[in-house]
Image (spheres, rainbow, N blue to C red):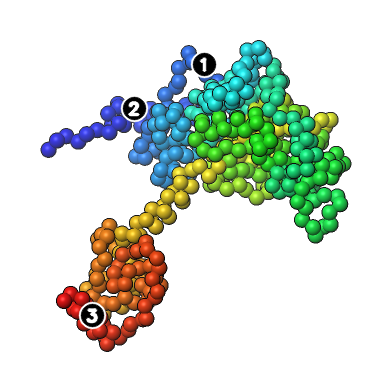
Amino acid sequence: MAPKKKNKKEANAAPAPAAKKAKKEERVGEIEEAPAPASESDEKAPDDADDLDDDDLDDDDYENPDDDLEGLVGELLNGEIEDEDAEDGGTHGAVDALRAGFQPIVVEDPRPAKDCEDGFAHAEAGNAEELMQWLIAPYSLDDFMRLTWERRPLYVSRNANKKYLDGWLSKEDVDGWLRAGKMRYGVNVDVTSYVNGVRETHNINDDDADDEEPWFADAASVWKKFDEKGCSLRILHPQRWKDALWKMLSTMERYWNCSTGCNVYLTPPNSQGFSPHFDDIDAFVLQLEGKKTWRVYPPRSEKEMLPRYSSPNFAQEEIGEPVLEVILEPGDVLYMPRGTVHQASCVDGEHSLHVTLSTNQFNTWADALELALPAAIRDAGAFYTLVPIRPRRRGERRSLRTFPGVSLRSHLAFNTRPRRLSTPPTDAFQLHPDIRSYGTTLSRGAPRAAAVPATGHASAARDRRERRRRRK
């Protein structure tokens, strides 16, 4: 018998379990220190912890091994995939990053304006990878995908070049859109406030009745709420009116291979527009004007990591202590994985304008399976056999009995020829008018009229006579 072929892990000489554990503890320590951006000359430390098999793990490797996710999702979240896959964009170590404290990576960009690349040129040319690198520079895009993406926040400060993001959008653009009279409440703009722990929406003009649903936002009413009541503005999909943003999003979609969007947030001084929450998107916050204090909190539990849906509004006592509290200034960028709890408030003395770029919404394997499996089952139904639900009759093969519900009989699968049963169609078939009469395969043709129910021994005898007549 030919020798068993070794897989990739067996072919490489693996260190002893004790050495693996020591290296894993060393790696966790590296994560807690939030590594600085690596240069091209730096050597990348090996990640032997990712090669650990289940049999090699001790009880001390995790605080509660019973809570570990299992299967493919568990491998992605717990860091049990190969490093080369991570370098190609695969996520790993998200749960380990949370258990290590969800420590953010903080980077200071020391480059003056003359040494910085032109983000507009990359967006115009559709250079996806170059645009993403420009967005988080000087942090390495390769390190971002390996160590940061979907694992921890990233804050890039640009004190040396406050004009790094100039030209993408301004408060004057927002004012022009409002005064053009084409901004609709709930579709293009929301007016919001968060005062004393209460989040409210004020999508109504001053001259509208309370029971009237306004259609277009009146610029005078909106700016009055902004200036006098401290309300924030959220502009939805501003790329409709700003070509620079549209080109940026179009280029980013080439990198992420999924839909990418953005919203704009304009906040008056000394106010807050939204309550603490987490989103279902990976967010890149670009501070364009003014200053804003951001408080970033880790996911409240492992179950809320990388969620598929956004959270409700949280109370302050529900979110714990922040892992990052920073004032974003013009040119700064903040990245937050989906599931990151956050809140932001404007400082005294000046307004704040930022744009949030969003990606990876409904872009998980679960979302793909939700779309693919129903269609696959629907297509497979044209070939599988449907069996009626009823007691077995005299002379009927025992294999035709089924459990409650309609079963898919695998031994008759993919047989496109209609099969005749030893008994006539019953109500179970008549509930599906598109099933061929006297057959058991689904038909894609026009629905047939339901036949008159046939019951009892007399109907069975008539059916046998009919089949014998057809055979002749």
Q: Which mark is residue 279?
A: none
Residue holding disc 1: 39
Q: How far across and how far down the image is residue 261, in percent?
A: 60, 38
The C terminus sits in image quarter: bottom left
Q: CA distance from mark 1 to mark 3?
A: 83 Å
Residue holding disc 2: 15
Q: Is residue 395 above or below residue 247?
A: below
Q: How far across and how far down the image is residue 394, in percent?
A: 23, 81
Residue holding disc 3: 466
At 31% from the left edge and 64% from the top edge, which residue is drawn? 441
Give amino acid for label 2: Pro
Q: Is residue 433 above or below residue 181?
A: below
Q: Is residue 115 left or right of residue 63?
A: right
The answer to whether residue 42 is visible is yes
Q: How far across and how far down the image is residue 26, in percent?
A: 47, 26
Q: CA distance from mark 2 to mark 3?
A: 74 Å
Query: Mark 2, mark 3: which one is toward the viewer?
Result: 3
Residue 98 sits in quarter: top right
**Helix, strand or loop under label 2:** loop
Query: Mark 1, mark 3: which one is toward the viewer?
Result: 3
